[in-house]
Image: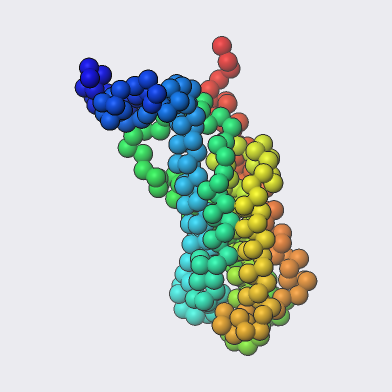
């Protein structure tokens, strides 16, 4: 009975689940069902992992938004001189199809190394911070946008651009938009590995340790293949078959975005160690 006011006043009131009284358990914010204080540490680690995984999910989902928006911006600012590199149906195929399963895998990530050595985050820190949005839209997003547009112009270059106008219809235009779509999806494969950690190298946690992501990538590639090569879906999503020459260009983007972000994380880790100074 005497513990109840203190438990209510505490930032986080903790009561014993076995030895504690019913009044104490009702007043507490947290009840240790095993009466083991070590469980608090495990709960905090799990809570931090859940919070970070939600952020990882958000970063990955927002990545493709910039890559999808830039082709429309280019089309508008060029006043139609650059035909739309990505169609509405292709945007929907990314948002509602290829992106979803790998994103779900990010929610199953285990806590990163060093999670418990970090200080608590501020109470007023939002789930969607400005730094998160910058990383998602202006880092990953712009790299993926570059991948999509480079694939679009590369296909047109194979067919005579800039000596000939950019394709604005027919099979060449369909192949060009398909290249943009495929480049974004392939870039997302590299990005989903990048999103698994914030600053640690993916190799430290195990490149193939999250099997849900691996399954998600497999499903993502199957969906992309169906969109490109299944005649019934080609007419709906304005796609056309791509050859080995085009795929040789596309597959370079997954390792490219992955390695570039690994270098960013390496720089952050070294800068962090340098700012802390030598250990005393």
In this view, the residue in front, 156 or 114, is 114
In percent of the image, x 35 and y 25: which residue is there? 14
Residue 152: x and y in percent read 63, 72
| Vertical relation: 154 (above or below) 64 | below
> In screen coordinates, is 46 left or right of 227?
left
Q: Residue furthest top?
A: 280
> In screen coordinates, is 253 left or right of 141?
right
In percent of the image, x 39 and y 45: which residue is there? 127
Q: The N terminus lies in which quarter of the figure?
A: top left
Q: How many marks?
A: 0
Q: The C terminus lies in which quarter of the figure?
A: top right
Residue 227 location, quadrant: bottom right
Residue 217 location, quadrant: bottom right
In this view, the residue in front, 185 or 8, is 8
> In screen coordinates, is 173 left or right of 48?
right
| Vertical relation: 168 (above or below) 243 | below
In this view, the residue in front, 96 or 125, is 96
Residue 27: x and y in percent read 26, 28
Q: Residue furthest right?
A: 244
| Vertical relation: 276 (above or below) 244 | above
Residue 258: x and y in percent read 65, 50
């Amino acid at each position: 009975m005497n513990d109840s006011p203190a438990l209510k006043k505490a930032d986080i009131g903790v009561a014993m689940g076995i030895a504690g009284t019913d009044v104490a358990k009702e007043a507490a914010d947290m009840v240790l069902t095993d009466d083991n204080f070590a469980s608090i540490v495990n709960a905090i680690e799990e809570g931090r992992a859940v919070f970070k995984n939600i952020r990882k999910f958000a970063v990955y989902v927002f990545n493709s938004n910039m890559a999808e928006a830039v082709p429309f911006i280019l089309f508008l600012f060029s006043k139609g001189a650059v035909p739309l590199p990505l169609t509405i149906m292709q945007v929907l195929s990314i948002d509602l199809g290829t992106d979803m399963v790998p994103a779900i895998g990010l929610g199953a990530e285990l806590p990163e190394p060093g999670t418990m050595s970090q200080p608590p985050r501020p109470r007023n820190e939002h789930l969607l911070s400005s730094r998160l949005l910058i990383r998602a839209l202006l880092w990953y997003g712009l790299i993926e946008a570059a991948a999509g547009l480079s694939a679009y112009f590369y296909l047109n270059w194979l067919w005579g651009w800039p000596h000939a106008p950019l394709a604005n219809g027919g099979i060449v235009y369909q192949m060009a938009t398909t290249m943009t779509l495929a480049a974004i999806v392939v870039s997302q494969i590299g990005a989903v590995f990048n999103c698994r950690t914030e600053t640690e190298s993916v190799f430290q946690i195990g490149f193939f340790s999250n099997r849900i992501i691996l399954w998600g990538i497999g499903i993502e590639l199957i969906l992309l293949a169906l969109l490109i090569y299944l005649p019934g879906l080609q007419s709906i999503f304005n796609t056309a078959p791509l050859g080995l020459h085009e795929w040789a260009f596309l597959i370079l983007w997954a390792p490219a975005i992955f390695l570039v972000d690994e270098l960013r994380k390496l720089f952050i880790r070294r800068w962090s160690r340098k700012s802390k100074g030598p250990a005393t």
